[in-house]
Image (cartoon, rainbow, N blue to C red):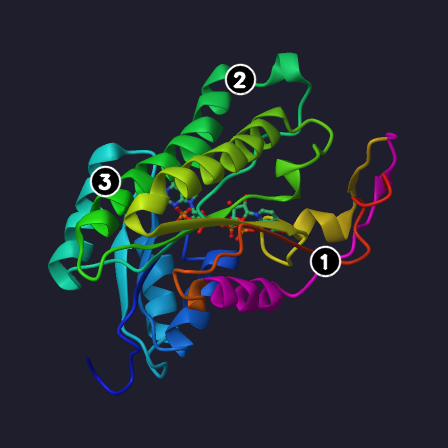
């Protein structure tokens, strides 16, 4: 191990932008070796470039989490380069077109399910296999849920259904992982200032039909929270954490 790293290996999906980028850089700053996955090589390379002065080693691996072969190749690369995985942050995700339920294309529904649910399952499945056989055994999986894992926004059936499903996935992995020291927790984020959340600052439909500008929070608060979850010993776990812009409409029904 070099003096710069802490010996732990993390995989962040969707690491080329937004929350994934901020969390990958935070983990690198704290000495994790980080594998950055996402579909756009150029976006990943830009983060690797930014990470040059940081303590850990950054490795960009293009991967489409919806594609089982692509995920298998990603984990082969991790196995070959580092021989283990300590933390998986299942972060890659997408939203859907804000349309009435009958107008949502079936192909778009399938793409949302493939990305937000099957993609998380495929990465979890591969991580589970590696973590249960590696020595020292075990590891941590952190799933990126959402406030939408608790309550829908108008016209968001695909996003809301898949994010609710992530809560069940988190609980199953927590339970089935116990005997292998595989720990699983979920972070439910509300309105972190990223490209995906930009529209909140312009005004978004509310349950009562009004359009309202919503407060955002700095994405660095999410990165700090994920670092905290990642740093815990395997004997402790943040099972669920909700971190949100304090005054966004959620608590108090608005
Ligand atoms: N921002 C918020 O306030 C907020 C709130 C709640 C939950 N979240 C969740 O946080 C996560 C990240 O969102 P963000 O706000 O950071 O938005 P973002 O910048 O759009 O990030 C999404 C990331 O996912 C990657 N991705 C999408 N489809 C992929 C696929 N098939 N394979 C691999 N990577 C894929 C994208 O990279 P490529 O396009 O290069 O593949 C991108 O880097 C999502 O799961 C989102 O639901 C965000």
| 212 with respect to 63 (left or right) | right
- Secondary structure of the residue carrying numbered label 3: helix
Which residue is the extreme one toward the top? 102
Label 3 vs label 2: CA separation?
25 Å
- Span colored in magenta: 208-229
Mark 1 C-beta to ligand 1 under 8 Å: yes
The x and y percentages for residue 186 are: 52, 48
The answer to whether one can see residue 90 in this image is: no
Name which quarter of the figure residue 205 lies in: top right
In the rendered image, residue 226 lying in the magenta stretch gets the answer yes
Name which quarter of the figure residue 67 lies in: top left
Q: Which mark is residue 70?
A: 3
Q: Quadrant of the C terminus?
A: top right
Q: Quadrant of the N terminus?
A: bottom left
Sequence-first tag of 2 and 1: 2
Label 2 vs label 1: CA separation?
30 Å
The residue at which mark 1 appears reads as 216
The x and y percentages for residue 142 are: 45, 51
| 167 with respect to 129 (left or right) | right
Q: Are marks 3 and 1 in contact (CB under 8 Å)?
A: no
Q: Which mark is residue 105?
A: 2
Residue placed at 88% from the left, 30% from the top? 208
Label 3 vs label 1: CA separation?
34 Å
Q: Residues within 10 Å of mark 2 (few under 14, many from 20)?
A: few
């Amino acid at each position: 191990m070099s003096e710069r790293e802490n010996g732990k290996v993390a995989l962040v999906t969707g690491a080329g932008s937004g929350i994934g980028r901020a969390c990958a850089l935070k983990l690198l700053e704290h000495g994790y070796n980080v594998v950055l996955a996402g579909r756009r090589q150029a976006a990943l390379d830009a983060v690797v470039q930014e990470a040059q002065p940081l303590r850990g080693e950054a490795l960009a691996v293009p991967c489409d989490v919806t594609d089982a072969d692509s995920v298998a190749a990603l984990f082969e690369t991790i196995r070959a380069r580092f021989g283990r995985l300590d933390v998986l942050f299942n972060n890659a995700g997408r939203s859907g077109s804000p349309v009435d339920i009958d107008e949502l294309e079936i192909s778009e529904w399938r793409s949302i399910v493939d990305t937000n649910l099957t993609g998380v399952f495929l990465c979890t499945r591969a991580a589970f296999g590696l973590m249960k056989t590696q020595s020292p055994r075990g590891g941590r999986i952190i799933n990126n849920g959402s406030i939408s894992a608790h309550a829908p926004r108008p016209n968001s059936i695909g996003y809301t259904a898949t994010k609710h499903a992530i809560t069940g996935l988190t609980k199953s992995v927590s339970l089935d992982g116990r005997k292998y020291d595989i720990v699983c927790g979920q972070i439910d984020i509300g309105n972190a200032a990223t490209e995906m959340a930009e529209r909140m600052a312009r005004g978004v439909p509310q349950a009562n039909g009004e359009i309202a500008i919503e407060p955002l929070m700095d994405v660095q608060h999410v990165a700090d929270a994920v670092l905290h979850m990642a740093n815990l010993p395997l004997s402790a776990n943040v099972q669920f954490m909700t971190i949100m812009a304090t005054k966004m409409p959620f608590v108090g029904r608005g």
